[in-house]
Amino acid sequence: MPIIFCANTGRTLEGKEVERKEEINREFWQMYGGGRKVLARDAVTPCDVVIGSETSLEEAHAFYVKHDVSALPIVDQEHKVIGLLNSESFAQALSLPDWKKAKVREVMQENFITVAEEAELEEIWNWPVEWFVVLSSSSSIKGVLAKQDLASLLYKKVQQRLQQLEGVLDSAHNGIIAIDKNGIVTFFNKAAEEIVWRKKKDAIGKHLSQVIIPQGLLEILKTGKRQLCHKFAVEYSAGTRIYMTHRTPIFEDGKVVGAVGVFQDISEIEAISNELDTVKRLNRELEAVIGASYDGIMVTDRNGVVVRVNEAFERMTGYKSTEIIGRTLMETGEEQFLPGSIVEKIKASKQPVSIAVDHGGRQFLFTGNPVTDQEGEIVRIVINVRDLTELNSLRKELKESKELSRRYHSELYELRRKLLQHEGIVVQSPQMQKILELAMRVATVDSTVLILGESGVGKEVIAKLIHQNSKRSEGPFITVNCGAIPETLLESELFGYEPGAFTGASREGKLGLFELADNGTLFLDEIGDLPFPLQVKLLRAIQDREIIRLGGRRPRKVNVRIVAATNRDLEEMVKNGQFREDLYFRLNVVPLKIPPLRERKEEIIPLVNRFLEKYCKNYNIKKTISSEVLDRFLKYDWPGNIRELENIIERLVVTASGTTITPADLPEHLKPQCSDTSPAVLVKGILPLKNAVMEVERQLIEKALEQYGSTYKAAKALRVNQSTVVRKLNRIRREANGGG
């Protein structure tokens, strides 16, 4: 059978694109909001590619990247799905000796279930697997479905329902204020703004005492008792206002976790309360409040005869108002659903009573509150009904979503750590950990990055890491050393040239590095060596995102991310007029300063081990390093940093005669010497002091140049400026030639 073929037809797949997840999610919510059951086919990620179990991981990885799918089904000879290949599989493959040649069956994921496309999502959500392979009615593979995607969709649905609930409450005519167990305002609707004369933005998050007076709602937190039809007066500069409020505690697991106050200004109603029409209007408004309540509400007289129920009560219990109004709870509770005993308990205690009832697979909480007259006699009993099943279900789903998020965060961190190891980056010091964390964050955006550090610290490695973890990772990564290309050629290399732009130019013209790096990253190494005249053109290219070829007139748009690096002090160069200030600020958007190896010596031994393993494998040599050599490495300052360390290890692997590298195998400048700890100048005779100083300077400079190979590194070892070394070297040479 073919190794990789179309899941539905068996033909080889070439170039067919997988539908994007965003389109699937959008269709999912259109159907979910429509009210019908959502099936597996509605949320599945289509996958027209399956692979055989004997396919190599290298081939499978190529198709996995090309078709941008979350998982590839794996089938046997009978075209039966036996596993899945996903990102976890490739992460596991990295531990294999030669993962590219390994077969997919060695790392395939078997934690999956095949489901029909007609399966309901609510049903398969509870199945204990993380992946589903969806089959069509003809048993062909339709696609894959990750449980992680289901969790995200369900979480969005929860958010949608919460927003709908807040919209309903915000449209209520009566003021509604909710507080948490600490008295902090958590909900404040528009009607409350008009009554309290305080904007919502000035109330949410404040303590109730800073929002409204009196503080009766805070008493509910202490007592846990409901207060209905409570009136209170508030003194304002314009006069006294009267309010009617209903205060209700919010319970969670039997504990008060907050309170809700529903209130309205009844100052005018109180003034003309003797007028019948006003009383009727008040009664209608109170009915509207009760009717708009999301919780079911039933009102009885003192004997338990039902006098009123709201629509929510009918919806929750299934009883119609015409069936129970005028009857007692004992008469309507034949199925032991409506707790008739709650009336007798309230009459006996004259206190609120709560009873939990399980009915039809759902759990309801009945809370009865007595309403008394002026003599303290019960005249009404208000029973609140809350469906706890849905709330508990949402709470459980939210908890599971949070657990999944924490687990995925942990897995992402582990994958990122393995990626760094795979790229050959050793991170042991706190400084490098912070730098890599910042580099990974910066990689996700297109900001310009300036990498600073001495020669050999790994600036290009960090630049590649940023590119590989960016959204441009599929694009090119172009490197140009601004100090290694002659000034006369650098402009044409960067910006390209048109045909016949200059003598010897190609007839076809030439693409510049900016154009070659389009949709990718351009790494400008040694940016401090960029000639001053070219700095203006580079600045314009970065700012305008367009370039003009040498000899051309038409601007060309380029989409390039700039990462620059240098071992020079650009700030000092700006002060000395050697580097443009505007270009410096344009490059220095996100600076990353990599410390030299001598400041992070905890990474020397891990680097030594990595380089030793690398070159022993390259040259098929097996060698170890003695502890004395490692100790010498730790004491050495490494002016060439990681590049120097790697070169030393490669030299020792090749040149050391024994199987163990000893101090005797080290280069002269690394061998322990008395002069390393007790440098001294030997004087054998008397000579003019000036001549003696010049002779010592000559010997030190020549020795440093012989050891380090450049005036820059020699100056660093001698702890003077490079210009000082160049000036003294020129003077020594003039003296040697008999000059003045």
Image (cartoon, rainbow, N blue to C red):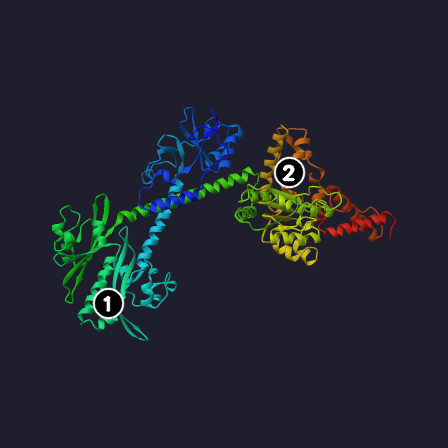
* Dot label at residue 246: none
Dividing the picture into quarters, in which one does residue 666 lie? top right
User: Where 515 falls versus 347 (above or below)?
Assistant: above
Amino acid on which the number 2 mark rests in the picture: Glu
Q: Residue furthest right?
A: 738
Nearest the viewer among 585 and 402 is 585
Front one among 340 and 49: 49
Vertically, is 681 above or below 55?
Answer: below
- Which residue sits at x=23%, y=63%? 285
Q: Which mark is residue 231?
A: 1
Residue 480 vs residue 498, the one in the foreground: 498
User: Mark 1 and mark 2: span between their CA atoms?
Assistant: 83 Å
Residue 519 appears at what percent x and percent y? 57, 45
Q: Is residue 308 left or right of residue 119?
A: left
Q: Is residue 637 visible?
A: no
Horizontal arrangement in the rendering, residue 453 relative to residue 66 (left or right): right
Task: Please give the name of the residue rendered at 70% of the width and 37% of the height, measured from the top-left corner.
Answer: 667
> Which residue was labeled with disc 2?
646
How would you rate the neighbour count of disc 2 (Cα within 10 Å): few for under 14, some for 14-19, many for 20 or more? many
Q: Nearer the viewer, mark 1 or mark 2?
A: 1
Q: Amino acid at mark 1?
A: Lys
Q: Indicate the secondary structure of the residue bearing disc 1.
A: strand
Mark 1 Cα shell of 10 Å, populated few (<14), some (14-19), many (≥20): some
Q: Mark 1 and 2 residues: CB-CB less than 8 Å, in contact? A: no
Q: Which circle's residue, 1 or 2, is located before the other in the chain? A: 1
